[in-house]
Image (spheres, rainbow, N blue to C red):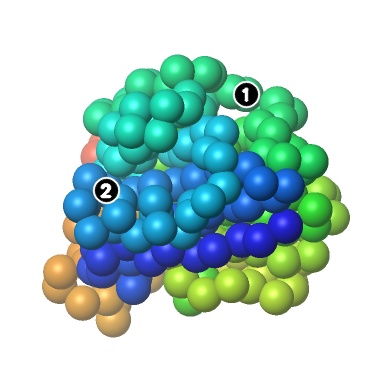
Amino acid sequence: MRIDLVLAPNAGPYTGPGTNTYVIVDDGQALVLDPGPVIGSHEANIVQAIGDATPVGVVVTHTHPDHAPLANPLARRLGVPAYGYAAGPEFVPDVAIADADTVTVGNRGLVAVHTPGHTPDHLCFLLDGRLFTGDHIMGGSTVVIEDAADYLDSLYKVRDLGARTIEPGHGPHIVDAVAKIDEYIAHRRMRERQVLDAVEAGAGTVDDVVSVVYAAVPADLRAAATHQVRIQIRKLLDDGELVAADGRLYRSGSGP
């Protein structure tokens, strides 16, 4: 088996050095994972990485614009199906896959693991001890999430898979999968504590909490920080750790 990383030229604040596209080759067949955005030079590099292997599919972890838009046009070019959890902006799967489904390449099988949290449609893929994580876990940074409870549950889920290494959707290869997942879990729990402590100290609005918890965040990332705080507060309200009254937040049991 051979796994080639083809880096998309879409570096930025939310994509790091760019999207990691993986070309997985086994027994003369090739599978493309997360082809990324529609960029001609990137598509050419993917095709070059496939080389003489016979393509059998294009797979996406989720439908964000830095991961999925090239999937359908590339699949048409290669004459293979595009696989994904569900349709989204600029992507429609030819074959829908769900938790525990397997996509075969050569003598190997990528096992889909449904990991909602970053997005509802997010999938990771397990292959011979390697966990391809898309945006569920990234090299060098944490991730923006849409549902804090789902995300934390999904972190525990992938921790239990027994993966040895992580191939992330952005950033470098991660050698110790369990240590990195534990680090992510600890980070999410820390953020919960920080939000609770900020509210207990008098931060009564989302903006107040952002100013405390993300005091050092650059101005161009404050919108993302605000989004994260809203998501975290929603979980803490659902958990009963916080209450909202008269337009303000309070720790449970210490409302107005």
Q: Position of residue 133 (x, y in %)?
A: 57, 53
Quarter of the picture holding the N terminus: bottom right
Quarter of the picture holding the C terminus: top left
- Tell me which residue sits at (66%, 32%) in the image: 103
- Tell me which residue sits at (59%, 72%) in the image: 173
- Tell me which residue sits at (39%, 51%) in the image: 47
Q: Is residue 105 visible?
A: yes
Q: Is residue 245 visible?
A: no
**Number of numbered labels in the structure image:** 2
Label 2 is placed on what type of residue? Pro
Residue 97, image quadrant: top right
Q: Position of residue 5 (x, y in %)?
A: 50, 65
User: Label 1: which residue?
Assistant: 98
Q: Position of residue 210 (x, y in %)?
A: 29, 64
- Few, some or many C-alpha atoms within 10 Å of disc 1 (few <14, some 14-19, many ≥20)? some
Q: Which disc is residue 78 wearing?
A: none
Tell me if label 1 and label 2 are in contact, CB under 8 Å: no
174 horizontally vs 49: left or right: right
Residue 42, image quadrant: bottom left
Vertical placement of 116 versus 140: above or below? above
User: Label 2: which residue?
Assistant: 37
Q: Position of residue 222 (x, y in %)?
A: 21, 65
130 horizontally vs 250: left or right: right
Between marks 1 and 2 in the image, the one whose residue lies nearer the viewer: 2
Among the two numbered marks 1 and 2 on one chain, the one whose residue lies closer to the N terminus: 2
Which element type, helix, strand or loop, lies under badge 1? loop
Label 1 is placed on what type of residue? Ala
User: In this view, which residue lies farthest toward the left?
Assistant: 219
